[in-house]
Image: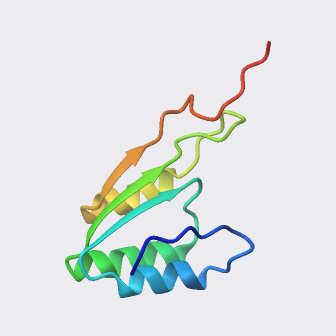
């Protein structure tokens, strides 16, 4: 499958699940918030199929609130590579 930008919520979750399900060799995923159990389940199944997966997650919201902790734990426990974006990336600072 070729590279494709999927924008939520305009695109449904289906193109994401289809891309994960069709992956045979590798997946590189960047998500601001990975909280959908269907996506986590699909990633775990792909990992079991020996698909090489790398996931880039935001560690914090713009407000500074931590996010993706649960998804990160699930993925790391399964042996999937997970990295954090730079926490300063995209955060505005008060003047």
Q: Residue at x 58, y 64 (%)?
A: 35
Where residue 47 appears, x then y in whole percent? Answer: 27, 74
Q: Is residue 59 above or below residue 31?
A: above
Q: Residue 83, how many percent across, how many down?
A: 37, 46
Residue at figure coordinates x 61%, y 79% from the top left? 13
Quarter placement of the C terminus: top right
- Indicate the quadrant where residue 92 lies: top right
Q: Residue at x 56, y 82 (%)?
A: 15
x then y, percent, for residue 5: 56, 67
Taking depth in this image into account, of 33 and 74 the one nearest to the observer is 33
Residue shown at 65% from the left, 41% from the top: 61
Residue 44 image point, x, y percent: 34, 75
> How many marks are shown on the rendered structure?
0
Q: From the viewer's perspective, is residue 38 above or below residue 27?
A: below
Q: Quadrant of the N terminus?
A: bottom left
Q: Is residue 7 above or below residue 21?
A: above
């Amino acid at each position: 499958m070729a590279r494709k930008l999927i924008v939520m919520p305009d695109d449904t979750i289906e193109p994401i699940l289809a891309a994960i399900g069709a992956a045979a060799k590798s997946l590189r995923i960047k998500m601001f918030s990975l909280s959908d159990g269907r996506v986590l389940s699909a990633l775990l199944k792909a990992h079991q199929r020996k698909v090489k997966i790398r996931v880039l997650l935001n560690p914090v919201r713009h407000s500074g609130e931590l996010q993706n902790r649960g998804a990160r734990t699930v993925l790391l426990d399964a042996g999937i590579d997970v990295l954090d974006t730079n926490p300063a990336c995209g955060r505005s600072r008060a003047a």
